[in-house]
Amino acid sequence: MSIRVAIAGPRGKMGAEAVHTVMKHDKMELVAVLDYKEVGATLADLPMFPASYTVPIFTDMHELVEVTAPDVLVDLTNPHAVYKHTKEALNLSVRPVIGTTGFTDAQLEELSALAKEKELGCIIAPNFAIGAILMMKFAKEAAKYLPDVEIIEMHHDQKLDAPSGTGVKTAQMIQEVRAQKAQGHPEEKETLEGARGADFDGMRIHSVRLPGLVAHQQVLFGGDGQLLTIRHDSLNRNSFMSGVAFCVEEVMKMDQLVYGLENII
Ligand SMILES: NC(=O)C1=CN([C@@H]2O[C@H](COP(=O)(O)OP(=O)(O)OC[C@H]3O[C@@H](n4cnc5c(N)ncnc54)[C@H](O)[C@@H]3O)[C@@H](O)[C@H]2O)C=CC1
Ligand SMILES: O=C(O)C1=N[C@H](C(=O)O)C[C@H](O)C1
């Protein structure tokens, strides 16, 4: 039996790619999409999709669920909409697969408790690309031996959140194994605010935004007379799609929230 999938944010860069991925998948059926404004009756009304994509567009999650009964909601929207969507989906017994970044710790905790209460799978994946997951895992391993680390994440200039979800997740994974440490000179002073980047538990995260970039990250480690750089580059959004499809299948087998694909691959 096919997994019934709904996608929030179908006109976005990631959402449009996910629409094609689900439409082509032999174990999934795209039953609906969620937009925030009226743009047409079905995807076929939008110039970016072929006429054969007669998938209905909704602007209200409750109506979408009532009419099309999805098993899974894939959210690829923005940091302002995603928390509400995730909560609504869980309350309507739909399993969320969330690629959108920008959650606060408090929101993650609340959603985790809600998924547990509802006994529903929910995946919040700051990065769907396997190479990025490996980069984070390798960085965590390296930080056991080289605790001086700085993260440089680089993205296209349309990105709303900084630091990136991947940058934050990398720092959180490193934090699990690294003794708290404020890096740099104890008396260092910024003569220009922000020069040393964001401070995460003494680690610095630097966010670069430029047209031409897609999604890239370097984790730099410094030791006595040596440097280690772990780098990942997503060169297009197709790099995320096998992860999206994997999560849609996995979330059907789960009964709680998982934050980060490294916990299930
Ligand atoms: N987890 C991962 O591997 C990846 C995550 N992302 C994240 O996915 C999100 C989307 O990224 P992009 O596609 O690049 O952004 P985008 O700006 O191209 O697309 C976002 C879409 O969401 C729509 N939208 C906004 N509010 C909405 C609402 N309330 N309901 C329905 N749709 C709404 C917008 O109309 C827009 O079409 C971002 O948070 C980004 O950080 C992006 C790439 C990979
Ligand atoms: O906005 C993006 O593009 C991306 N967002 C995610 C993040 O914030 O880490 C994943 C990937 O880096 C692309």
Image (cartoon, rainbow, N blue to C red):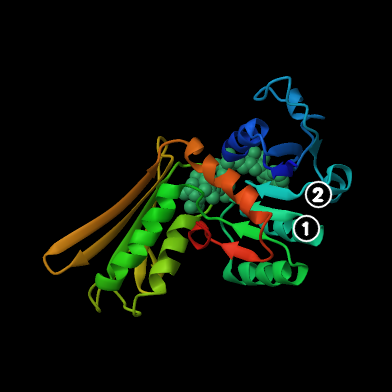
Earlier-in-chain disc, 2 versus 1: 2
- Residue found at the very far top of the displayed protein: 51
Q: Which residue is mark 2?
A: 61
Query: Mark 1 packing: few (<14 Cα in 10 Å), some, or many (20+)?
Result: some
Q: Residue at x 29, y 54 (%)?
A: 230
Reply above or below: 183 against 24: below
Which of the pair 95/252 is nearer the observer?
A: 252
Query: Mark 2 packing: few (<14 Cα in 10 Å), some, or many (20+)?
Result: many
Whether residue 110 is visible, yes or no, is yes
Left or right: 78 in relation to 166? right
Badge 1 amino acid? Glu
Which of the pair 5/156 is nearer the observer?
A: 5
Q: Which residue is mark 1?
A: 88
Give residue 242's position: percent from left, percent from top: 53, 42
Q: Residue at x 67, y 24 (%)?
A: 49
Q: State yes or no: discs 2 and 1 in contact (Cβ < 8 Å).
A: yes
Give residue 173's position: percent from left, percent from top: 43, 67
Left or right: 241 in relation to 248? left
Badge 2 amino acid? Met
Q: Label 1's element? A: helix
Beta carbon of the mark 2 residue lies under 8 A of ligand 1: no
Give residue 70's position: percent from left, percent from top: 78, 46
